[in-house]
Amino acid sequence: MIWIVFAAMTAAVIGALLWPVVKSKPAESEAERAAYDRAVFRDQLAELDRDVERGTIGKAEADAARNEISRRLIATAQEPVKKPVSGFAWAAIAGTLIVPLVALPLYLKAGNPQLPDVPHAERMANAEKAGDMDALIAKVEAHLEANPDDLQGWTILAPAYRRMMRWADTTEAYRNVVRLSPPDAANLSDYGEAQVMANQGIVPAAAHAVFAQALAIDPGFPKARFYDALALKQEGKTAEAKAAFEAFLKDTPADAPWRQMLLAEMQDMTARPPALDQQTMADASQMSGEDQQAMIRSMVDGLDQKLAANPDNLEGWLRLIRARTVLGDTDKAKAAYKTALETFSGNEDALAQIAALGREMKVE
């Protein structure tokens, strides 16, 4: 009986997938697609003009972006109309049918529909032994809901969230670690860093204050020193940021894992003005979350365009890969990672740095 139910469900799903293909009209013409593309590009040009008026993008970046969008807009008018690809419907039908045709014999060989499901309680009880990370996290979350002042639970949960890049949850977990434990530079720095990651790489004022607290406890703590200098740079305090970076570099060992990131930020200061001046920071504080996101993305896109013109900037590629990952643009981060590897294919030192960042950001 169960096989009949499964077969009926499978047939229903296949029918639902194939019905639009069988009954659909021919695909839209290339002319219609070109008209749609032109409308999109015109909207992008209008949005770019609004970004310039708001001051969220520099003139050079705006000109470069406008040239590229205009080039694509012109190209849509020049592309010849292509005929629809024949046989599309048959290809879609074959592609849909091949899945059950391949899955069925494999399941008959290795599957067993009579196996019972694992109850939730049993899964939770065996989570640690089975290495079920999701179940472990759920177990700790349930425990902390009933015991919100359990420091050990928050200490376990915070790094787990960080590995999963759940930055809002990471921030909350480290907030509780800081709340429940004695003042500690490492905990404060982790709390501040989580806020930075949750804010798309921009150091908010609250996080800057947390790093200041960490430095008051331990003036030499590396993570707090780096983000303190980065905050000064983003706030447009160029002289203070430069002094902080140079002092940090002087105290940094040659084999320190953060040395390359520190050098990249210092080189970036000499390559262009600070990311945000005081007025821009004030304006950004009044923006909605969407507007702040748009501003950050425009800055990252500007870096992408600079690298297209000057691909030999290793530090720029490292920043771009990290920024794309933090923004959640996984495909673009992977594309930047691949391009960086190709660009520095003969430079072993550069390839090692790119590969190390790729492993850290999980884009290799």
Image (cartoon, helix red, strand yellow):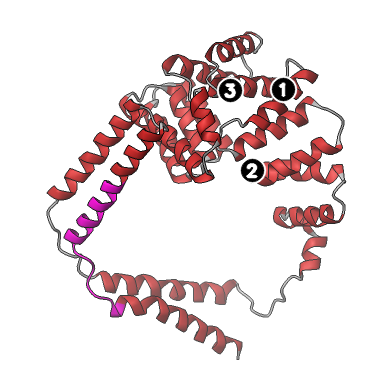
Give the percent coordinates (x, y) of residue 127. 78, 57
Q: Is residue 314 left or right of residue 135?
A: left
Visible in this render: residue 128? no
Q: Main secondary structure of the magenta part?
A: helix
Q: Give the CA distance from mark 1 to mark 2.
A: 21 Å
The quadrant of the rendering that contains the N terminus is bottom right
Report the front residue among 342 and 68.
68
Assign a secondary structure to mark 1: helix
Residue at (55% x, 16% y) in the render? 237
Q: Is 238 above or below relative to 346?
A: above
Assign a secondary structure to mark 3: helix
Is tag 1's residue or tag 2's residue first in the polypeptide sequence? Answer: 2
The residue that disc 1 covers is 212
Give the amino acid at mark 3.
Leu
Give the percent coordinates (x, y) of residue 3. 57, 86
Give the amino acid at mark 2.
Trp
- Name the disc covering residue 230, or none: 3
Assign a secondary structure to mark 2: helix
